[in-house]
Amino acid sequence: MLEIVFISTLNGVLYGMLLFLMASGLTVIFSMMGVLNFAHASFYMLGAFFGFEISRHVGFWPGLVIAPVLVGLIGMAVERYGLRQVHRHGHVAELLFTFGLTFIIQEVVQMVWGKLAVDYKVPPALDFPAFTLFATEYPAFKIFMLAISIAIFAVLLLIVKRTRVGLVVQAALSHPDMVGMLGHNVGRVFMLVFGVGAGLAAVAGVIAGPALVTQANMAAALGPILFVIVVVGGLGSLSGAFVASLLIGLIQTFAVAVNVSLADILGDTQMAETLSVWFSDIWSVTVAQIAPILPYLLLVLILIFRPRGLMGNRES
Amino acid sequence: MPHTRRRSLLATYGIWVALAVVLVALPYVLNSGLAISTMCLMGIMIIFSLSYNMLLGQTGLLSFGHAVFFGLGGFLTAHAMNMVRATGAPLPLEVFPIVGGLTGLVFGVIFGAVATRRAGTAFAMITLGIGELVASSSLILRSAFGGEEGISVDRTRVLQLFGISFGPQVQVYFLIAAWVFVSMAAMYALTRTPFGRICNAVRDNPVRAAFIGYNTTTVRFLSFSMAGLFAGVAGGLAALNFEIVTSSAMGAAQSGTVVLMAYIGGVGNFAGPIIGAILVTYLQVMLSDVTGAWQLYFGLLFIGIVMFVPDGIAGLVARQQPVLVSGRLHEVLPRYLMALLPGLLALAGLSMLIEMTYQLTVNAPEGPAMSFLYVPFDASSPLPWLIAAAMLAVGLWLFLKAGRLALEAYGDAVEAARGNAR
């Protein structure tokens, strides 16, 4: 039992940090430009596939650097030649533009790498068990993933809180016109931030690719969860996104570890038998089986009891 | 005065009579099996995308989970049909879409109570979450939703009125056409009511709508529920058309498709979603036969519409009205054609590039030999790539040039039309 708790906590924190790597980019882009980038998970997928392709030719480590830079450049191009053009048609058009982009990226990835999962392997330098915990070997690569996620989070926080760039970004967040008046090129700041956001998603993709599965539907599977995080944490709140990412990471990993259904809990009493006839569907479903829908349940619950999200300070 | 009144009456009801005539005549004109089943699908999608437009076009709500109502309506209709078949209750097939509609309404009320508490981007995310919640729950709750296989029905096994068995597809077509007509009329009538106008007000300026005393949340909630109702009708029709409902009917792909339909057709115009539903369904059926990369073309079409024609195809057509009225269409049309030709050239170049890539990657086992527009060539040699790239570049360059000229001509024509009116 202690083993399950410990390993699940570790895995949950790891998954949560990965989610946060992506959600942070998404949140910053949203709070600056007011547009929720639907294609954010697609940039994550691009990162994973670029990482795979580069690591196949020159190794994992160059890939870890080159792939996010490439994806960041693509993100900047998307902002400059796509989003900025669409901006005058309003936020709905911007949202729909990124929505359309998900289709195109998905199709292009399918065209280039096929529909099946590609063989993206953990680099040999990290392919060993880091430590043994209650007879379970914990892979070094996962520790590496955790370290990278935390390092990037720390650097990001430092840049935003302690540097001049961060100051401009923060100011552009709340008062874009004022920042523009002061002589900063807000358009370029937006483009850079969009690029950095896309690059962050790509970092997550490069390091998550070998651990999870790298295939053409990975964006569609993860995209909705990112939006759950952003809404649950509170729209535009970075710390909210952090808490929500960890929460969802932990909930999902713990749910997968729990293999209990209503039938197991209530045993075979008389009442249980009558109930099982009526609720035959829900009866034998284990907690592990409903793990994929838990984030969405959380979303609905949050909306009912705290519509502005965990740490949001405005209604919409 | 009586003259104008008669004319406006004709203008109001004439188009509906014409629609009814067209709906009845269509299966006699296009009478192949493929055409009739495609038209059935189009009819279903017309109701679905019109119901979606009640949200996006009329109330300004961007929903990414609208297929939930379509799917739930379909499932409940299927269950009702199976139940009626088992008990022998005297319910004819014609009324079953009502079951779907009521289901849509009930779930619209339930989900709307949660989702419409927020507006704007948050609303979009919430509907996405609800959509995912319902779609993934349907795979878990196996006995209610039939798991991967879905729920099958047999539409010929319910009460038959006037000896109509609904075995032949064309009989189903007429049933769908009737429901399309009724739903279309009902949704159009709804836009003309004070409620429809308030929805527009909430879309255009929620603060002002709230200020003059309307509860914007309530308006959004009512609109959401009504949209659920009509999406449920569409789902019910889908259930009896395909005789099977699977959980993919309410998945993210289906929700995405209806967004594409409404937006490509044009959300600002009642006819927009109808055009979009017909066009997108046609492309889905026809294009998927021609090329494996059809969804890419689809995404490109959508992005193009979002970037350059945000009011959709219907908006593009509607913008020609002043030109038509002033009788200057013959001046503008040659300019349009001048822009269209290089546009087509660029499109051909682009699709040639896409098809060649597709041949070398997905179709790699078949070898590099392929043909494009009936011209056979080898996709691995550099020449076709150069030709395609040149077609794209030259076509695009000329298109941009000619497009500017066409826009100028259009601007002049509109200006002249205004001058005449004055």
Image (cartoon, coloured by chain):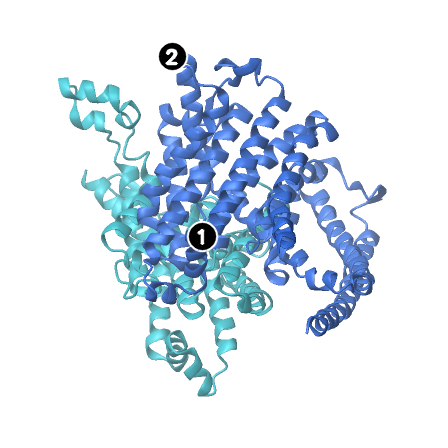
Chain colours: A cyan, B blue
Residue B148 position within the rendered picture, expressed as x and y whole percent measured from the top left:
45, 27
Q: Nearer the viewer, residue B231 or B136?
A: B231
**Residue B418, disc:** none
Residue B123 position within the rendered picture, expressed as x and y whole percent measured from the top left:
38, 54
* Residues at marks 2 and 1, CA–CA distance in whole angstroms: 41 Å
Residue A236 position within the rendered picture, expressed as x and y whole percent measured from the top left:
35, 65
Q: From where the camera sits, is residue A219 visible? A: no
Q: Is residue B179 left or right of residue B374?
A: left
- Residue at point 32%, 58% (across, down): B215
Q: Is residue B203 above or below residue A103?
A: below
In the rendered structure, which amino acid carries the disc numbered 1? Answer: Gly
Q: Which residue is mark 1?
A: B196
Q: Which residue is mark 2?
A: B87
Q: Is circle 2 on the same chain as circle 1?
A: yes
Labels 2 and 1: the sequence-earlier one = 2
Residue B183 position within the rendered picture, expressed as x and y whole percent measured from the top left:
51, 38
Q: Residues within 10 Å of mark 2 (few under 14, many from 20)?
A: few
Q: Chain of mark 1?
A: B
